[in-house]
Image (cartoon, grey):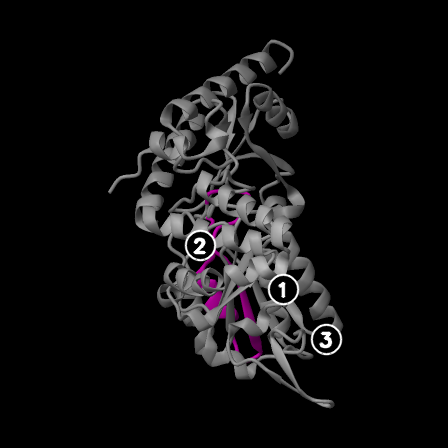
Amino acid sequence: MTIDPETTALDTPGCRNGQVFLDSAGSSLAPARVADTVVDHLRRETEIGGYRAAAEREEDLEAGYSVFAELLGCAPEEIAFTDSATRSWFAAFRSIPLKENDRILITEVEYGGNAVAMLRRAEAVGASVEVVPSDPSGEVSPTALRELLDERVRFVSLVHAPTNGGLLNPVREVVDAAHDVGALVLLDGCQSVGQISCRADETGADFIAGTGRKWLRGPRGTGFLYARRSILDDLILDEIDHHGGEWTAPDRTRARDDAKVFELWESSIADRLGLIEAARYALELGVPEIREAVRDISGRLREGLARIEGVRVHDLGVRHSGIVTFDVEGVPAPEVVAALARADVTVTVSREASTRIDMERRGLTEIVRASPHYFVTPQRVDRALELVEGIVRGARNGGA
């Protein structure tokens, strides 16, 4: 069934005032029922305390593992909840054994946070971090990857959808090639889960890290991790507490044998309940239906921007996500963002440091990032396009 943007906009409090919200790649607008779930639980905590309030929702919290297993195509025992995509990614990365002369492979669109962690750990142990070239379309090249792979490659970091453009990288080809030499693959799905299919049973990835606040439309401060259960025995599981492990004797411990080994005991119960509700909401709409709706509305924006003289669209790749990046000739990206904000159009700036390799390769420092979700109507996209045209005219007349 096709998603009706008018209906989902009515179900989104942030859309009721006429705002044109184009920042779901940053922190999306929550559906009313997701926001209500979080607020109601916080209120309950003020009434009876956090422990009793959590106990009342124990079944709902446990059901969350099955909800995310359905979303990510895996077993409930392969799901862990965290406080961010970064925490999920770091937990997986830090568990992968790495020693001197080992090799890590990354793509040209690697995230800044991930890159810093990999470079620092590689330096500490004497490993190397190497970049897999892209093909002419901008996607990571499976051919180039195979030429780089050997038995010293321990880990491949694969960004599904980068933060600075609408590119979608191929996944299964990369995973299969990495597995041929025994390397593990950590798929960063922070910009894909919630707008396109990102499933363990389809991708074959060993880990999938994601967030609640972006396309899934959940609360900030929430994340999740898929970890293939069959690899847990081969990992370094030393950054755990008494939730991820057990203190069995004064001098002995035992780690869990499921993905909860990556969780910490303390968490925001209200936010986790909101995250679970957001995943339910997405599943009820249907991931294929979401994909179609996001593709249509972002395509309308991308094509409209490309028709405006003085605007350059910077999206790479053959297939596209809901992210659309562009710049306006003669107007710095922050000024474009500010001008649109004055008209109640929400976009953001994507900066060089977020995806340094790709941005430097293309000579970009700052670009405007727009990311419409399925609750954005065509009329609101057209309004944004008219405003961008106005910014172009203003720049030509001496000021944005």
Q: Residue at x 45, y 68 (%)?
A: 205
> Are the residues tagged 3 and 2 within 8 Å (C-beta)?
no
CA gap between label 3 and label 2 equals 29 Å
Question: Tag count in the figure?
Answer: 3
Query: Which mark lies nearer to you, 2 or 1?
Result: 1
Q: Quadrant of the N terminus?
A: top left
**SS under mark 3:** helix
- What residue is pinned by disc 3? 125
In the image, residue 280 sits, relative to residue 337, either above or below, namely: below
Q: Residue furthest top?
A: 397
- What residue is pinned by disc 2? 169
In the image, residue 321 sits, relative to residue 88, either above or below, namely: above
- What residue is pinned by disc 1? 90
Task: Please name the amino acid that badge 1 sits on.
Answer: Phe
Q: Is residue 292 shown left or right of residue 323? A: left
Q: Residues within 10 Å of mark 1 (few under 14, many from 20)?
A: some
Where is residue 6? Give x, y as percent. 35, 29
Task: Please name the amino acid that badge 2 sits on.
Answer: Asn
Task: Please name the amino acid that badge 3 sits on.
Answer: Val
Where is residue 46? Give x, y as percent. 64, 49
Q: Is residue 117 magenta?
A: no
Q: Nearer the viewer, residue 269 or 224?
A: 269
In the image, residue 400 sits, relative to residue 190, either above or below, namely: above
Question: Which sits earlier in the primary sequence, circle 3 or circle 2?
Answer: 3
Span colored in magenta: 138-166
Q: Is residue 374 shown left or right of residue 119? A: left
Where is residue 27? Give x, y as percent. 55, 41
